[in-house]
Amino acid sequence: MAGVLSALAGAAGSGKRIDLPVNSYSWGDKYSAGEQYGADGGYFSSLTGGNFAPANWQGRTVRTIMHEYDFYASVSRTVVSLDGYNATPVPTRLRVNGTIFTLGTGYVAWGSFTTAITYSPSPTNNINWTAHGLAVNDPVMFYCTSAMPSGITASTVYFVQTVVSANAIKISATPGGGAISFTGTGSGTRYGYKNPITGYQANGTLAGNVFAAMLPRAATITIASPAVIIATGHGLASGKRVQFTTTGALPTGLAANTTYFVINAVTDMFNLAATQGGAPIGTSGSQSGSHILREVVSITLS
């Protein structure tokens, strides 16, 4: 399913609101759920709902917020994922609907990978990676399905030591360290990973839809002034924030992935305004495809 998360990110009183699409929400049964807010074209590209303009928190890019709840095990896991490996600043608190969670580092994922890797062993010690786009000290990781070259350990974080060319690098064990010497060319499928994403994890007891938001749903839009949004059982009150995604085109007057305010809400329909309590928006022209309505909800990251 798709939706939107609006994150007030930063220290209390100085936060910046960030809109992230909710790209999945699934229930295992009535006692368990998993939801993911945000996705990009890299590691999270398998999620539905399309890409988004990556959000910024104190100079770091927020990629996703994920929540999982298991009633039977009494386990709740919430992960905020930001670009970088051992990067600063580090988020320490997540506030959801008045409940504050302490964040710790959960795991490292990777924003992109390739199987177009070959190894030129000692004395060359080059890793050949077509159009790698890497810079000195960028973190990287490698894996071979059969055997790694001797001197390089699978699934271990290394750093670019030298950019030999646009298609080759040398690696070191630490930033600024000496180039690693290795023998052999590896075997099987050879993977190279870059653009690390660190997940900062909070454990607690939040159940189900932690943001208490409308689950994303199909909507139709009239070509009228004002436009009427029709979404069965939306449950939204006037003043709530929403966005749209579409498989085609929205009518003139509305834009995808843009926050609007609900006004004149009644059962199954409402109007929209560009600002809180503003004038109703009219639409014109034509439209195509299927539209998804997503509520904007808020958390605070600090």
Image (tube, grey):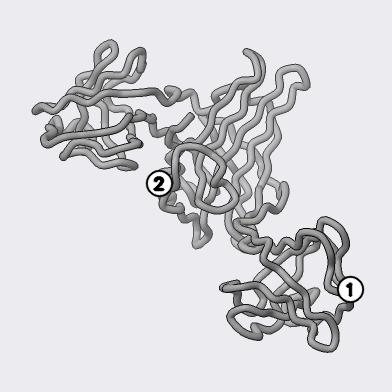
Which residue, given by chain and number where applicable, does mark 2 sit on? 17
For the question of whether residue 85 can be seen, the reply is no
Query: What percent of the width, then of the height, locates residue 259?
Result: 31, 39
Q: SS class of the residue under badge 1?
A: loop
Inspect the image, locate mark 2, and give the three-letter code of the amino acid beneath it: Arg
- As measured in the structure, the alpha-carbon distance from the residue carrying label 2 to the one carrying label 1 is 46 Å
**Up/down of 81 relative to 1, above or below:** below
Q: SS class of the residue under badge 2?
A: strand
Residue 45 is tagged as none
Q: Residue at x 73, y 82 (%)?
A: 176
Q: Residue furthest top?
A: 267
**Up/down of 21 relative to 177, above or below:** above
Q: Quadrant of residue 165?
A: bottom right
Inspect the image, locate mark 1, and give the three-letter code of the amino acid beneath it: Gly
Q: Which residue is nearer to you in this view: 149 or 53?
A: 149
Q: Residue at x 48, y 29 (%)?
A: 1
Q: Residue furthest left?
A: 225
Total marks drawn?
A: 2
**Up/down of 283 relative to 268, above or below:** below
Q: Which residue is nearer to you in this view: 198 or 170?
A: 170
Q: Residue at x 30, y 41 (%)?
A: 256
Q: Are marks 2 and 1 in contact (CB under 8 Å)?
A: no
Query: What percent of the width, then of the height, locates residue 124?
Result: 79, 87
Query: What percent of the width, then of the height, locates residue 281?
Result: 15, 33
Which residue, given by chain and number where applicable, does mark 1 sit on? 151
- In the displayed structure, does residue 144 sit left or right of residue 251? right
Crowding at label 2, few (<14), some or many (≥20) Cα neighbours within 10 Å?
Answer: some
Give the foreground label among 2 and 1.
1
- In the displayed structure, does residue 283 sit left or right of residue 40? left
For the question of whether residue 265 can be seen, the reply is yes
